[in-house]
Amino acid sequence: MVYNFNAGPGILPPEVLEGSRQAITDFEGTGLSILEVGHRTPAFEAVVREGQDLVRALMDLSPSQEVLFLPGGATTQFFQVPMNFLAADGVAAYLDAGIWGAKAIREARLWGGVQVVGSSREQGYRHIPKDWTVPPGAAYLHYTTNNTVEGTQMQAIPDADVPLVADMSSDILSRHIDHRRFALLYAGAQKNLGAAGVTLVVVDRAQLDRQVRQVPGMVDYRQHAQHGSMLNTPPVFAVYVCLLTLRWIRAQGGIDAIAAANDRKAALLYATLDALPTFRPTVERADRSRMNVVFVIDEPALEKAFLDRCQAEGMVGIRGHRSFGGFRISLYNALPTGHVEAFTTLMRDFAQRHG
């Protein structure tokens, strides 16, 4: 048996994998593979519409919020957001709480002014920046809701009198949050929404009216909204996997049920880490992520032994990001609680043997 703790692409529900497998040979009774079906056929247009409707329902969006399925990954949004909404003589506010936020800042500076309102870089991104304020008149405030690499998470939506823009790539649809408060949010699908290749963007029409420059069509949110996410050929297979994942989330009971399961998984893992001196969590308690749990072993000689033990028991994706080392366990929506229980059992046994 394989226990998949990969940070991304992450684990998918068995029902989604089976539905994807079937669609590769026969897409919903059409006799065609999902890999060869026309994207402007009624069958696939129905996929996009249902996916958009499920996002609206699961997130409790307002009627003014557009749902887009776009190519390019969340990294494309790092420049697409400022390209559309940050004037050359304007200023946008950014929170620097991890490597992905830092990359978004670098991209934004190509298009206009950036004010970093808070940063935890000097502390190694081990906590969420505190006591920061947004300058009045900022074009928007951009932040990352969950830092996949560092294992920190924003526990509340910031109070700001400017449009809110959020990268939710690693905790989208994992907890209850007021999605109506965002002018724009985006998430790469490959952690909680499906397969790599498609990015979910939710943008309010009022934000679309704030576009500051003419941009090429493929990076113009207004054109994507006008064409129903089919300005060009979309990543058809990835969109379909996203639809299957959204159906699965609904079948589990929606975000509230998913969040309750995620809370149980995270509580079990953190309680085990806190109880075992062999391991040490690296994130301040108040900022701990429910999605990506990062920890270290202070005795370097034990790192390899622990990784070897995990590999021997079929536990993959344990090694931490190359920038930070240590270990990382990703607790995405599709990860069964039993996998966390198996991992914590291994941790306790390892600590007993080597403590």
Image: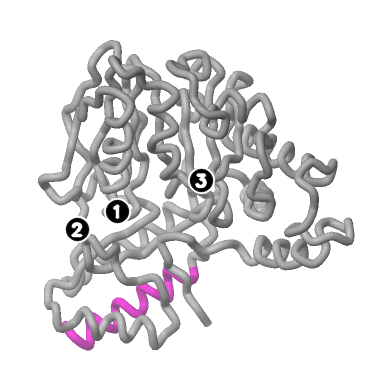
Q: How is the image coloured?
A: one colour
- Amino acid at pointer 1: Gly
- Amino acid at pointer 3: Gly
Kindly check if marks 3 and 1 are in contact, taking CB atoms under 8 A apart as contact: no
Q: Residue at x 36, y 40 (%)?
A: 145
Q: Residues within 10 Å of mark 3 (few under 14, many from 20)?
A: some
- Amino acid at pointer 2: Thr
Residue 256 visible in rendering: no
Q: Residues within 10 Å of mark 2 (few under 14, many from 20)?
A: some
Residue that label 3 marks = 72
Residue that label 1 marks = 151
The quadrant in which residue 256 appears is: top right
| Magenta part of the chain | 338-355
Residue that label 2 marks = 282
Look at the numbered disc 3 and give the secondary structure of its residue: loop
Of badges 3 and 2, the one in the foreground is 3
Look at the numbered disc 2 and give the secondary structure of its residue: loop
Look at the numbered disc 1 and give the secondary structure of its residue: loop
Q: Residue 79, relative to residue 5: is it above or below?
A: above
The chief SS type of the magenta part is: helix
Asked whether 98 or 108 is in front, the reply is 108
* Sequence-wise first label, 2 or 1: 1
Q: Relative to 306, is 74 on the left or the right?
A: right
